[in-house]
Amino acid sequence: MISRLWAKIGKPSPQTAESPQPDRVPQHVAIIMDGNGRWAKKRGLPRIAGHHTGMKAVKRAVKEADRLGVKYLTLYAFSTENWKRPKDEVDFLMKLPQQFLALELDELIEKNVQVRMMGSKEDLPSYTIDALEEAIARTADNTGLVLNFALNYGSRKEMLDAVKEIAEDAKAGRLSPEDIDEQLMNARLLTGGIPDPDLLIRTSGELRLSNFMLWQLAYSELWFTDVYWPEFNEAHFQEAVMQYQRRKRRYGGL
Ligand code: IPE
Ligand code: IPE
Ligand code: MG
């Protein structure tokens, strides 16, 4: 009765307002995990405390994505521009993948999660690469959620590298300019076989992309929250997905 009344006045029924619908879950969710430093500052703590607590939010986001039936979760963990930060902070950030995986890899394996990484391995310390490569190798055959860490990732570098590779192929006669289309570009980007994000989430109140997946986000739905990343929880994730489910995607059509 109540839900019929809601339907009549054009609002979602109380039930659908509380949790995402199991159909129409975004296949690929990408997150710009921002606001660790401000979260710490607000508490009188050093910035690295925000990064440390941010790992717990990563764990929550992975679990919630998996529970909701999201197929790909891409997390922006370190940008090509983040090297500009003080050395101590960069060093701390570089140790996080190893720390996170030491704590979580067994559970990720148990949950059938496949770990991937997108970004440049150049300049990454060997312990960071080793931890990621071990996780990638040990989860390569898993068929559940794909957990893609964007680490030392920058969209402009990604596109320039792809363009250089294409130019080399053209110069060597392996392809001609007519072969260069969206499909070829998609294949040459670091996202390879991963579909474009359906939903982009950015925390901390900043309303920008900060060099993240500029090509792939062409038609993604964007959702911003003022919540700082270390506070991001299951309810926020659900709210983003519910907002996504209320949107009408048009891709330039009607
Ligand atoms: C996001 O939090 C983590 C990384 C960029 C590595 P920030 O460190 O950017 O935190 P704010 O934006 O300064 O608060
Ligand atoms: C984007 O956040 C990068 C990551 C979340 C890893 P930043 O904090 O680096 O972005 P800006 O500097 O505010 O644009
Ligand atoms: Mg930031």
Image: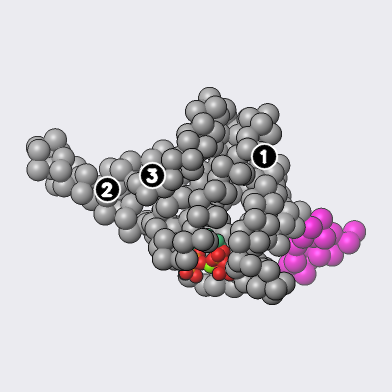
Front residue of 181/235: it is 235
Instruction: Using the image, determine if residue 21 lies above or below residue 210.
Output: above
Image quadrant assignment for residue 171: top left
Q: Indicate whether residue 11 is drawn in magenta.
A: yes
- Report helix, strand or loop for mark 1: helix
- Report helix, strand or loop for mark 2: helix
Checking the image for residue 121, the label placed there is 3
Magenta span: chief secondary structure = helix
Question: x and y percent of residue 167 in the render?
Answer: 16, 47
Front residue of 108/1: it is 108
Residue at (69% x, 44% y) in the render: 63
Give the mark nearest the N terminus, 1 or 3: 1
Q: Which residue corresponds to mark 1?
A: 103
Residue at (67% x, 47% y) in the render: 59
- Residue density around tag 1, few if under 14, some if 14–19, many if 20 or more, within 10 Å: few
Highlighted range, magenta: 1-18
Q: Indicate whether residue 100 is drawn in magenta.
A: no
- Residue density around tag 3, few if under 14, some if 14–19, many if 20 or more, within 10 Å: some
For the image, the number of numbered tags is: 3
Checking the image for residue 162, the label placed there is 2
